[in-house]
Amino acid sequence: MNPEKPQGRTLQNITYATIFTVLIGWLLVIGQSLLLPIILALIFVYIVAAFDKFLGRVPLLRHLPTWLRKISLYLVFIALVAGLATLISSTVQQLIFQAPLYQENLTKLFGELTSALPIERLPDWETARAAIVKRIDIQAWLSATASQLSSAGGMFFLILIYVFFLAGERAGFATKLREAFPNPEQAERTQNIITAINESVGQYLGAKTLINIIVGIVSYLVMLPFGLDYAAFWALLIGLLNYIPYIGSIIAVLLPTLLSLVQFGSWTQTLILFIALQVVQLITGNVLEPKMLGRKVNLSPFVVLVALSFWSAIWGIAGAILAVPLTSILTIIFKEIPATRPLAILMSDDTEPVLRSFNRPKILRRRRKLMTVEVDPPAEKTAD
C-alpha cells in the first residue's frame, strides 16, 4: 500500500473544501438581492409558527381551527410590520424637518465642550472648529437614511409575497419530501434535519421576539417621562437592534441617547436617560434572556461573535440580525453529515446534546469512564 495516498487524498479534500467555501461566499455576496428577501421571509414564517404553537396551548384559543388561527396570525403580523414601516418612514421625515434645531443644539454643546479645554488659544483652533462643525451635518445623514429606507420598501413587498407562498407550501412539504427521496433512510435523515431546524430556530426566534417586544415597551415607558422626541420610534429601533448579539443592545441605547443630547442640550439629562436605558438592557441580558432562551441554539459565544462579523460583512445590518439563526442552521446540517460532525462539535457550546443527536453512546460512555476515579483497586484473583 502506498503511504502517500492518504495524505494526497486529505490534501485534495482540503483543496476542494476551500474552493467550495470561497465559491459559497462569493455567491452569497453577489446573490444578496435574491437570497436576503427569501431568508427574511423564512424567518418571518418561523416567528409566526412559533407564536402559533404558543397560542395552541392557550385555553380559549386552542379550540379554534388551525387554519383560522394561522391566517389571523399572518394578517396581524403583516399589519404590524406595515404599520412599523410607516412609523419609521414618517419619523425619519420628521427628524429631517427638526434637523436644523438639532444642529444648532449640537453646535452649542460642542462650543461648551471645547471652551472648557485649554485649546482655545491655539492660533488655528477657530478654523478647525468651524471645519468640524461643518462636517457634522445631521440633515444630510438623515436624508441618506431616508433614501435607503425608500429603496428597502420594494424588498418589503417582495418579502410579503414570499411569505404567502412559503406558508402555502409548508403544509404539503412532508409529502414532497417523501416523493423526492424514495430511499426511506435518506428521507428520514432529511426530515430529521428539517425538524431540528424548525425546533431550534423557531423556538429561538419566538422567544427572542417576545423578549424584544418586552424590551421595546419598557424602554418606551422609560423614555416617555423625559419627553424625548419620537419615543415610539426609538423603542421600535431598540427592539429590532436587540436581535443583533452583543453590539445590538449597545447601539440601541446610544441612538436615543444621542438624540437626547441634541434635543435638550443637557449633559445631565442625557446621562440619566442613558443610565435608565442601560439598566433595562442589563436586566434583559442577565435575567430575562437566560430564563427564556436557555440553550435553544447551543452555539459557542466565540462562534456567535465570528458569525456576527461574517454575516454583517456580507449583508450589513440584515446579516447581523440573521447571524445567529443562519449559523444555528449550519450547525444542525453539519451535525447530520459524518464528514462535518467535528465542525458541529467545535461550534457548539454544550457538546453532549450534539453527541447524543447522532447516536454516539460509546463516546459518551468512554468520556464518563475517563472522568470516573476508581477508589478501590480491583480485587486480585487467588489460586484455589
Image (tube, rainbow, N blue to C red):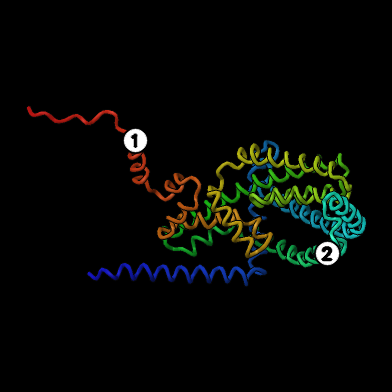
Who is closer to the viewer here, 284 or 161?
284
Which residue is at a point 36% across and 39% down the rendered structure image? Answer: 368
Q: Position of residue 228 (x, y in %)?
A: 86, 46
Badge nearest the viewer, 2 or 1: 2
Question: Residue visible at 44% across and 71% down?
Answer: 16
Q: Nearer the viewer, residue 333 or 179?
A: 333
Mark 2 vs 1, N-terminal side: 2
Q: CA distance from mark 2 to mark 1?
A: 66 Å
Front in this rendered view, residue 111 or 343: 111
For the N terminus, the image quarter is bottom left
Residue 139 visible in the snapshot: no
Q: Is residue 369 above or below residue 49?
A: above
- Is 135 displayed left or right of 161 in the figure? right
Task: Note whether residue 360 is visible.
Answer: yes
Q: Amino acid at mark 2?
A: Arg
Q: Quadrant of the C terminus?
A: top left
Q: Residue at x 49, y 53 (%)?
A: 347
Secondary element under disc 2, as helix, strand or loop, is: helix
Q: Residues within 10 Å of mark 2 (few under 14, many from 20)?
A: few
- The part of the image, by quadrant, that contains residue 86 is bottom right
Residue 90 location (% of width, % of height) = 86, 57
Look at label 1 and name its amino acid: Thr
How far across and how far down the image is residue 331, in percent? 51, 55
Residue that appears at 81% across and 54% down: 83
Question: In the rendered view, would you say 259 is above or below 20?
Answer: above
According to the image, label 2 marks what residue? Answer: 135
Pointer 1: what residue?
372
Most distant residue in the left direction: 384
Q: Is residue 199 above or below residue 282?
A: below
